Image: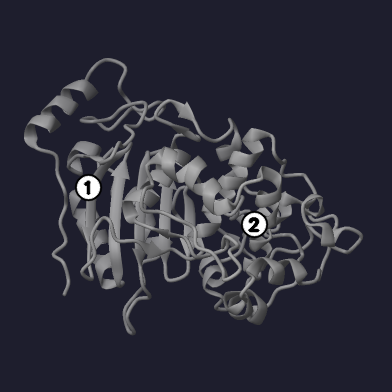
């Protein structure tokens, strides 16, 4: 059974009141001139529920939005959501799922892990320049002793990895942390870029030791609960270690809340969650080896980049090429990406968030990718 796609809308009286508030003096988008209607300099933050508005009121072309939703449906999505400045312009659910149904988002988990590191940095529990060996004692006196937390976040740690170890063995390992820590070093840190699940999993003992809290609890208490991500949780391996490279379960609405936190520079409804400057640092190129990557976030910067689709899906060559992930799309696009085209797209300049969660596209059909998602900002904005 497939649920009929629907767009939730505000009642007319609520919309009218919001429209009047938005038209008050001083409520245009900073630096962008606003888009009329419901534009505000500061986004609205959801409580238990998201505020909603029509696409036109949010300065989004409804025709383009419907086209994107149709492409998402054809690509075997289970949910698709677009918001601007904290208000939902449209959300769709398929495959007998609804807003509260959780789904694994695979490597989107990495961007959650990055955010947990940001929280620990803000608390003073660690710094990105700290050697990982500070918390992983077995690395002391080895070729890995100079690997830093930044290296793990940037994917240039030089840790051993291949298709077998990074996708098959780690998934099967009963203790993914022990397996990941125990792999060797193939190159000095900072000299090669390689997308590595096992390197990211090493952040699990780093966070555990640095904060004194299990990352599952840390994520729930410090990130998910403050943002109202009530359906989101990290999963664990058989040994009870949090899986930080993949495995997070979430919903379209919850993932949009993480996007809104990043969009608002780490502040949630007036409360600073992430330390000042963290979002800018995490969503800037972390290494010249791949300017399309920050701290476990994908970027659309110009220069030497690794194809995100090849890296995330382990489909082949990760040799860098010149250009952008999505040519012609704005350079300030930011993505959290996971296997099977799990997408959280954030565009700071327009205040838009797009979430797509689902399975692999059926044979003979095109998957819904960052190229499709970027059409929201290249074709779908009225102003």
| Rendered view: 305 above or below 168 | above
Residues tagged 2 and 1 counted as in contact (Cβ below 8 A): no
Which residue position is annotated with label 1?
Answer: 61
What residue is at 60 percent from the left and 42 percent from the top? Answer: 118
Quadrant placement of the N terminus: bottom left
Total marks in image:
2
Query: Measured from the top left, where is residue 303 in percent x and y?
Result: 62, 55
Residue 37, image quadrant: top left
Q: Nearer the viewer, residue 317 or 111?
A: 111
What residue is at 60 percent from the left and 64 percent from the top? Answer: 306
Is 107 situated left or right of 55 in this image? Answer: right
Residue sitting at the far right? 141
What residue is at 70 percent from the left and 73 percent from the top? Answer: 161
Q: CA distance from mark 2 to mark 1?
A: 42 Å
Q: Can residue 94 be seen here?
A: yes
Chain-order first, disc 2 or disc 1: 1
Is 123 situated left or right of 307 in this image? Answer: right
Is 41 situated left or right of 298 in this image? Answer: left
- Callout 1 secondary element: loop
Quadrant placement of the C terminus: top left
What residue is at 71 percent from the left and 44 percent from the top? Answer: 128
Which residue position is annotated with label 2?
Answer: 204
Q: Nearer the viewer, residue 14 or 104?
A: 104
Query: Measured from the top left, where is residue 126 in percent x and y?
Result: 71, 41
- Callout 2 secondary element: helix
- On residue 34, the disc is none
Q: Around disc 1, counting alpha carbons within 10 Å, would you say few (fewer than 14), some (14 to 19), or many (20 or more)?
A: some
Query: Measured from the top left, where is residue 16 in percent x and y?
Result: 11, 28
Q: Can residue 300 be seen here?
A: no
């Amino acid at each position: 059974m497939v649920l009929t796609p629907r767009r939730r809308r505000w009642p007319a009286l609520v919309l009218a009141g919001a429209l009047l508030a938005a038209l008050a003096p001083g409520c245009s988008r900073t630096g962008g001139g606003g888009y009329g209607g419901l534009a505000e300099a500061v986004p609205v933050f959801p409580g238990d529920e998201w505020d909603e508005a029509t696409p036109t009121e949010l300065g989004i072309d409804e025709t383009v939005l419907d086209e994107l939703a149709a492409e998402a449906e054809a690509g075997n999505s289970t949910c698709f959501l677009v918001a601007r400045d904290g208000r939902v312009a449209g959300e769709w659910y398929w495959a007998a799922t609804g807003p509260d149904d959780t789904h694994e988002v695979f490597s989107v988990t990495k961007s959650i892990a990055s955010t947990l590191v940001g929280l620990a940095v803000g608390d003073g529990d660690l710094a990105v320049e700290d050697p990982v060996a500070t918390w992983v004692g077995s690395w002391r006196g080895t070729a890995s002793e100079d690997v830093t937390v930044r290296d793990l976040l940037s994917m240039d740690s030089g840790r051993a990895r291949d298709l077998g170890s990074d996708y098959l063995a780690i998934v099967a390992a009963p203790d993914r942390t022990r397996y990941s820590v125990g792999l060797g070093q193939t190159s000095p840190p900072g000299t090669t870029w390689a997308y590595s699940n096992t390197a990211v999993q090493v952040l699990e003992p780093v966070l555990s030791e640095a904060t004194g809290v299990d990352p599952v609890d840390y994520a729930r208490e410090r990130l998910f609960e403050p943002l109202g991500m009530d359906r989101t949780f990290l999963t664990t391996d058989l040994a009870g270690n949090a899986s930080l490279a993949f495995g997070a379960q979430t919903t379209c609405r919850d993932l949009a809340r993480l996007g809104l936190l990043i969009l608002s520079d780490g502040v949630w409804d007036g409360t600073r969650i992430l330390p000042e400057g963290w979002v800018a640092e995490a969503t800037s190129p972390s290494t010249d080896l791949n300017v399309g990557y920050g701290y476990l976030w994908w970027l659309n910067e110009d220069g030497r980049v690794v194809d995100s689709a090849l890296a995330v899906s382990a489909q082949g060559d990760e040799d860098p090429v010149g250009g952008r992930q999505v040519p012609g799309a704005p350079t300030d696009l930011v993505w959290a990406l996971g296997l099977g085209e799990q997408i959280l797209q954030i565009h700071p300049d327009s205040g838009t968030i797009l979430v797509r969660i689902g399975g692999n596209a059926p044979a003979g059909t095109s998957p819904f990718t960052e190229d499709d998602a970027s059409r929201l900002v290249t074709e779908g904005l009225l102003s």
